[in-house]
Image (spheres, rainbow, N blue to C red):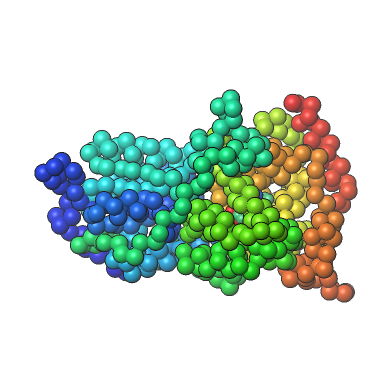
Amino acid sequence: LADTRAKRKPSETRASGCEDGAVTGPSIVWFRDDLRLADNPALRAALDRGEPIIGLYILDEESPGIRPLGGAAKWWLHGSLASLGERLRERGSILVLRRGPAAEVLPQVVADVGAGAVFWNRRYGGAEREVDAALKASLRDGGGEVSSFAASLLFEPWTVQTGSGTPYSVFTPFWRACLALPAPRAPLPEPREIPGPASMPAGDELEEWDLLPTRPDWAGGLRDTWEPGEPAARARLREFLSDDLDDYDRARDEPAAGVTSGLSPRLRWGELSPHTVWHETVSARATGTRAAAAQRFLSEVGWREFAAHTLFFHPDLATQNLHREFDAFPWPQLRPAHLEAWQQGRTGVPLVDAGMRELWHTGIMHNRVRMVTASFLIKNLLIDWRHGEEWFWDTLVDADTASNPFNWQWVAGSGADAAPYFRVFNPELQAKKFDASGEYVRTWAPEYVEPGAATPAPLVDLAESRKAALEAYEQVKRAS
Ligand code: FAD
């Protein structure tokens, strides 16, 4: 991104009124969780405005309430920004990188380049919405044009309401209500040319942000597993629809089957829009099993919508029990050694250890195994779900402000449409059912299937710890 660090010549780009009253000056497209060119309504609106376009990404780790990215997420962001910057340059524009609180940085960039208009796609977290609303108001007060768009969700949270006008708290009626709304709009085509400014505004070098780990470099497994960026995202969607969709309904719960889409980091970072996923899936759908598989797959995308819906109406989802009676849960004093053994995949339970090692190595974990490892932490080790949520936040490449706490609360029993508190996943039975051949455990925790190999001693007895959890949950029941 060396050429984004060029000299500022504000006089060349200063916004100015023209005779018919419209403001001229370049347009800024503020990229956030939408690191793509295709189906990007903010970019499309900027193109329609007709002025030169400056892409901007702000690394904001300072605004109150904005959750600083975890390590794996930073790794992904580096790759995705490098790809986006290159793609913008190929088409004639640029990506400017700036760091700091968005409330300060964006107005600064607007002034620096004399921008006449700012475009962005909407975010749904509480702190993010506050930042965006304040910026929209202040930039407009200053005479600028600001427009925001729906791009990251198929159904924006306030458009889906129960008959009595309240948010949904159960998935099935939520999704039914979504499907009764007008179908998601068709994706916008990818622009071939994007006009850039005459001069280059000041910006950071991507490398200066130190998003990649160096001391130590723990990202080897991530590099082997992933190629961040929009082209790889599009390629995986196509491959999934042609090669894996047929088996999705049957084998999606088997971690070794490799038939799920692997699109969660793509959707998290917006390398792919849910509209593109939706429409390409609908067009790939034929009859019979494929239709059932497509429907099932889109309903999983629906869970992502439901998590965002829940975050929108409960902005403190990552820290507060959604069902407040769970505040009475008697968490015992944290045993750091148990938490650490879980993080490192040394609990003595094969499927749990395999999952936690897959996560550490690749930045991802299969959904079924996420449920099992989370249940084990909460209901066998009796460790508060928030500790697990934080570990996943730091280690997942798809770590998402909505889906991560939403699913942790789902497993804990305190969340929306949650698993009942008395449902304690038995990791041995889960392994028998979903990893019958032992292939997944063999891949990630081979010592458990190698005759005579030393294995970690079990941290807890599964049956006894389950009993202790159920007794603790009784207190929640009494409190409610
Ligand atoms: P597919 O089966 O191919 O599903 C397609 C898409 O649907 C996914 O890419 C994802 O965007 C969405 N999706 C599927 N299941 C869920 C779900 N339960 N909740 C929300 N969206 C879903 N998903 C994240 O994207 N980010 C997270 O931080 C995250 N944390 C989780 C934590 C726990 C404890 C658990 C149990 C689940 C979590 N999930 C999270 C949900 C789910 O595990 C992943 O979305 C899924 O494993 C991604 O794999 P895939 O893309 O192959 O999924």
- Position of 85 compared to 413: left or right? left
Numbered label tally: 0
Residue 163 in the image: x percent, y percent? 59, 27
x 66%, y 45%: residue: 408
Q: Position of residue 99 (x, y in %)?
A: 37, 54
Q: Is residue 442 visible?
A: yes
Q: Quadrant of residue 198?
A: bottom left
- Give the quadrant of the N terminus: bottom left
Could you tell whether 116 is left or right of 79 in the image?
left
Residue 82 vertical placement versus 122 (above, below): below
Taking depth in this image into account, of 44 and 198 the one nearest to the observer is: 44
Q: Front-most of 297 and 143?
A: 297
> Which quadrant is home to the C terminus?
top right
Task: Name the residue rendered at 72%, 51% in the picture.
Answer: 371
Name the one closer to the observer, 437 or 480. Answer: 437
166 versus 129 height, above or below: above
- The percent coordinates of residue 9 (x first, y second) are 17, 59
Q: Which residue in the rendered view is the most extreme toward the front?
A: 287
169, above or below 479, in the image: below
Q: Is residue 121 left or right of residue 69?
A: left
Residue drawn at 63 percent across, 40 percent down = 176
Q: Hey, which residue is sitting farthest left in the picture?
A: 19
Q: Position of residue 300 (x, y in %)?
A: 64, 51
Residue 448 showing in the rendered view: no
Q: Quadrant of residue 332?
A: top right
Judge left or right: residue 295 versus residue 6. Answer: right
Q: Residue at x 21, y 59 (%)?
A: 8
